[in-house]
Every structure is written in structure tokens, then in C-alpha cells.
Image (cartoon, grey):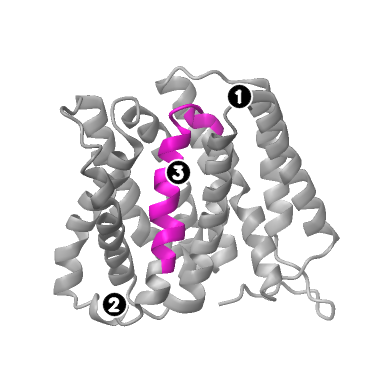
Amino acid sequence: MTRRGWVLFLAMGLIWGVPYAMIRIAVEDLDPMVVAFGRTLIGGLLLLPIALYAKALTPVLRRWRPLLLYTLVEITGPWLLIGYAETTLNSSTVGLLIAAVPLIAVLIMSRLGHEKFDQRRILGLIIGFAGVAALVGLDVDLSDPAAIGAIGLTTIGYALGPIIINRSLADLPPLGVVTASLVLATLIYAPFVALRWPTRFTADAAWSVLGLAVICTAVAFLVFFALIGEVGPARATVITYINPAVAILLGVTALNEPLTAGMAIGFPLVILGSILGTARAKTAVAGELTPTAS
């Protein structure tokens, strides 16, 4: 990976490790739908004038079908599902469960014929999923399977998002794709939010939604598209190596969440499995690293 790739990688790992704590704070006082709506609305409004000035929206809107699919699997669905899950799960657990995204991405890419499995990758998948199983089995209240299911669907969506970008949207202006998807997500949420709008906003919830919109949405997506362009879709999801560490740190220090046995066992297994599962496969002839599909 180039120096620029490492900078983008580390930046995204830090930026997208923060949302879990912010969402946890916000959903204590606001409906998850309202939190997701506020995030997309503010983020979209921040980027819209820039995108219009740069004339970045017109080519994106012509390709509205993959844009809609990307919006549903990367934004609309996951942000609502994570908010719902965090009404019962703590932010550290959610962050760790989503660390399975690279494993899901490798499976999808292999099915599409863009990634090859070797023994190392198979071992990585087994170890990674064992880590997730340890986390779920030791730390999560299984009496609420809906929350676990919500995060499971989120991991699939997050794995599909970069693939859709790479296959259908990579040649479009990143600013236009991000802005259009946020505006579209806002329109999807809007009819449902009207029935859930709160009578008052607490300061903690308001600041959390603002932080989600500015830092973890508007800024983060621009960096994320740059990362996909640098390292490819499957390895772009490896930012979830860092996300759980940030989520745990914030959860334990800022939200007084416990550092549990499941985290201690599951976290290193997920990380090791993801590293092995997403490592570049060696070619049979020259032994060099194969490029990411683009």
C-alpha cells in the first residue's frame, strides 16, 4: 500500500470508529430513525452547494439505479439498523460485530470471481467468524436476536457498498455520489421521521447527531471514496480492523461500558481472521501480489 493509502486507511479507521459511541448517546433520547435522518440531512446540506458548484451531480443522477442500490445497502439500511441495535447493545459490541465486514466482503468478491481463496484465507475466515461467535456467545443478550440480526444485515450492506462503487460508480465524481446518496437517503427517511419527531432535543443528542453528520458522514465519505480508489473495494473494508479498537476505547472511557471477556477473546480473533482473510493472494507463477479488482 502506498503512503497515501496508509494515511487514508488510518484516517478512516479512526473516523468510523467514533460513530458507535455517538449513535449510542443519540438513541438514548431520539428514535433511531430521527438520528439517521438528521445525519443524512445535515451531511447532505453541507455537501450539496459544493457538489452543485462543481457540477458533480448530473452524471451521477443519470446512473440512478446503482446509486439507489448503493444508498440502500451503505446508508439507509445500515444507519437505521445500527441505531436500532444500539438501543439494546453497547457501542463496543456493535463495533466489534461490524469488524466482520472484511470477511463478508472477501466471500462476496470470491463469488464474483474477483478474489481467490487459498488455505490462508480459508483459515482467516474460520478464525474471524470464531471471533464473532465468541463475542456474540459471551457478551450479547441472545434474548434480543433482532439486534443481532440488524448488525448482521449491516455487515452485509457495508461489504456490498464498496463493491457497488467499484463496479458501477467508480468513474463518477466521488463528491457527486456522496451528496446524491445522502440526499436520496434523506428523502427515503423523511416520511417515516414525521411520525417520530421528538418534542425536544437534549444537548448530548443534538451534538452527537451533528458530529455524525459533519465528521462521520460528509468528511468520512469523501475520504472513503479516495481510499477505495487507492486500494480497491475489498481491502477498503479493512478499516474495520481499527474501528473496533476506537469503539472499545470510547465505549469504555466515555460511556463507562465494560471491557468484557467476549471482547478480550473475540477482538483478537476477528482481527487475526480479517488480516489472513483479506491478505493479497500470491500468484502461482511469480509469487507476486495480485492486484485488487477494480
Answer left or right for 268 relative to 58. right
CA–CA distance between discs 2 and 1?
43 Å
SS at mark 3 in the image: helix
Label disc, if present, on residue 170 of the rendered structure:
none
Secondary structure type for disc 1: loop
Which residues lie in the magenta part? 69-93
Residue annotated with mark 3: 81
In the picture of the structure, the residue carrying the numbered disc 1 is 141
Q: Which amino acid does the dot numbered 3 rest on?
A: Leu
Q: Which residue is mark 2?
A: 61
Do the numbered discs 2 and 3 sit on residues whose CB atoms are within 8 Å?
A: no
User: Would you place residue 245 above or below residue 276 in this image?
Assistant: above
| Label 2 packing within 10 angstroms: few (<14), some (14-19), many (20+) | some
Q: Nearer the viewer, residue 12 or 191?
A: 191
| x, y percent for residue 217 | 32, 51
Tell me the SS state at disc 2: helix
Tell me: residue 16, above or below residue 277: above
From the viewer's side, name the closer residue of 5 and 48. 48
